[in-house]
Amino acid sequence: MRIFLIAVFTISLANSAWAQDKIDRLHAETMASFKPDSVNWQAEPILPKGAQSAVLVGDPNKAGVFIAWLKFPPNYPIPPHIHPYTEVITVLRGKLGNGMGERFDVNQGEILKTGSSFVLPAGHSHYVWTTDEETIVELIATGPWGITYTNPADDPRNRK
């Protein structure tokens, strides 16, 4: 029995170490601060023209958790779409409309103000939009990240 308990204890420590390793790989080698006015914003090609993104931690193109900021101009719609993994969105600046379903309808959604968050389960069709001001959101998700538009004609990658 004593050997069994020692084995269980050793395995539990090993599992704890493996979990810690996964968390550590998510973080940078040194402490980092992020400010909306000084991050490296890039055009976001998988969203309609006008969106910008800044990857803060991790890599959206690889397996694993990542954190990115997305910046949208005023009066900006993202048509109905799905994502392969669960997402957590937090509004950092401005307001973001969020609606569920395969048809874009701002009357069926809600407006989330700065400081509000929502969780979007994987594979659920939704759409978002901004109001009359620039909006910045934080996206926490698992990669590889992707988007599939309900209507393929809405996908900016299909336009040349």
Image: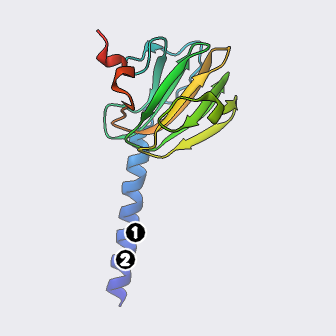
Give the quadrant of residue 156: top left
**Please, is residue 84 above or below residue 91 in the view?**
below
Question: In the picture, which quadrant includes the N terminus?
Answer: bottom left
Marks 1/2: CA distance? 6 Å
Name the residue at 47% across, 36% down.
102
- Is residue 58 visible in the rendered image? The answer is yes
**Please, is residue 40 above or below residue 108 in the view?**
above
Name the residue at 52% across, 16% down.
39
Instruction: Please indicate whether residue 118 sits to the left or right of residue 21 in the image.
Output: right
Disc 2 on helix, strand or loop? helix
Q: Position of residue 66 (x, y in %)?
A: 43, 35
143 and 14: which is toward the camera:
143
Q: Position of residue 50 (x, y in %)?
A: 49, 11
Instruction: Please indicate whether residue 136 sits to the left or right of residue 4 in the image.
Output: right
Name the residue at 32% across, 18% down.
157
Q: Position of residue 154 (x, y in %)?
A: 39, 21
Question: In the picture, which quadrant includes the C terminus?
Answer: top left
| Kind of residue at badge 2 | Val
Name the residue at 48% across, 14% down.
41
Disc 1 on helix, strand or loop? helix
Give the quadrant of residue 9: bottom left
Residue denoted by label 2: 8
Instruction: Please indicate whether residue 72 sits to the left or right of residue 8 in the image.
Output: right
Residue denoted by label 1: 12
| Kind of residue at badge 1 | Ser
Residue 134 shows which numbered tag?
none
Mark 2 Cα-neighbour bin, 10 Å: few <14, some 14–19, many ≥20: few
- Is residue 109 visible in the rendered image? The answer is no
Whether the residues at callouts 1 and 2 have beta carbons within 8 Å, the answer is yes
**Please, is residue 86 above or below residue 97 in the view?**
below
